[in-house]
Image: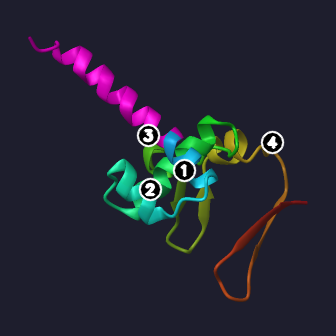
Amino acid sequence: MSEPKAKQATRKRARITDKHLKVVELVDAGKTVQEIQKELKIQTKNQVDALYLRGLVDKGKARPLIDLGRRGSSSRKVGKNGTVLLGRPLMVDYFGFSPGDQISFTVSDKGKRVVMEKK
């Protein structure tokens, strides 16, 4: 006799949830990405990375990243003249700035980093 679909879905979610914690344990044990992929039957390195980050967040070892794509277009916009607009959820809730703070941006010489500082 088979289980109801809702119960099967709950079990599947539990296995997925446990998988990200298992990835953290395997990394801490010194396993390579290839070994982790083989043991947990994960197809790509990106999936291992995503599960590892999720596991670190759940264990409190890392801060959660904000997913700008899910926040909608109000989180950031680039104007026609190159103006970058960053929304309140990103600046206040995530970075911890307060309304009225003066902020400076510095772009590195190599162009790969932007440093944001409160004045």
Report which residue position mark 3 lands on: 19
Report which residue position mark 4 lands on: 98
| Mark toward the viewer: 4 or 2 | 2
Circle on res. 26: 1
Q: Mark 1 Cα within 10 Å, few/some/many (few <14, many 20+)? A: some
**Disc 4 residue type (three-letter):** Ser
Q: Which residues are magenta?
A: 1-21
Q: Is residue 114 left or right of residue 42?
A: right
**Disc 3 residue type (three-letter):** Lys
Residue located 78% across and 42% down the image: 99
**Disc 2 residue type (three-letter):** Ile
Residue located 50% across and 42% down the image: 22
State the separation of the CA atoms marked 4 and 3. Answer: 38 Å
Q: Does 85 sit above or below residue 64?
A: below
Instruction: Name the spot of residue 76 as percent of width and height, x first.
Output: 54, 55
Q: Is residue 43 left or right of residue 86?
A: left
State the separation of the CA atoms marked 4 and 2. Answer: 42 Å
- Sooner in the amino-acid sequence: mark 1 or mark 2: 1
Which residue is at the front of the view, 74 or 22?
22
Residue located 35% across and 28% down the image: 13
Which residue is at the front of the view, 70 or 33?
33
Residue contact at pointers 1 and 4, CB within 8 angstroms: no
Q: Mark 4 Cα within 10 Å, few/some/many (few <14, many 20+)? A: few
Q: Does 33 sit above or below residue 20?
A: below
- Sooner in the amino-acid sequence: mark 3 or mark 2: 3
Residue 66 in view in this figure: no
Residue located 37% across and 48% down the image: 40
Circle on res. 36: 2
State the separation of the CA atoms marked 1 and 2. Answer: 7 Å
**Disc 1 residue type (three-letter):** Leu
